[in-house]
Amino acid sequence: MNDDEVYDGPAALTVAGVAQEVRVRLAGRIDPIDGKYHWQGTVVAASSPEKLSGGLAVSVTIGSRTAEGRLAEQTPWGSYSITGVGAPPFDQAEFD
């Protein structure tokens, strides 16, 4: 995977029905063992980071695409790791 296969930009992060604007850096791949698309990356919350914590179920919306994911943990830099399985919130066709 190279930098051309990474989405880096604005997104909406929804937690418990409340959306907030965030910046994400996401990438993904098909796992050869389970055959599913796994995406992951980093979320930088623009506001209310104290309401976020690792393990929360979230949805990420980029344009018209939404995907369900989970915040994995807060990084030492104050951002959050996020993971998801299935269709990602970014358009994979951009990378073909």
Image: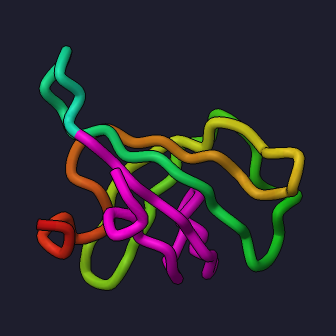
Counting from the top left corner in percent of width and height, residue 85 is at 31, 38
State left or right for residue 33 relative to residue 85.
Answer: left
Counting from the top left corner in percent of width and height, residue 46 is at 75, 78
Q: Residue at x 32, y 63 (%)?
A: 5
In this rendering, the answer to whether 5 lies above or below 38 is: below
User: Nearest the camera: 2 or 27?
Assistant: 2
Q: Is 23 colored magenta in this rendering?
A: yes
**Colour scheme used in the picture?**
rainbow
For the C terminus, the image quarter is: bottom left
Query: What residue span does the magenta drawing correspond to?
Result: 1-29
Q: Is 14 colored magenta in this rendering?
A: yes
User: Nearest the camera: 51 or 79?
Assistant: 79
State left or right for residue 89 relative to residue 53.
Answer: left
Magenta segment's dominant SS is: strand
The residue sitting at the top extreme is 33
Residue 86, picture quadrant: top left
In this rendering, the answer to whether 35 lies above or below 2 is: above
In this rendering, the answer to whether 88 lies above or below 28 is: below
Residue 77, picture quadrant: bottom right
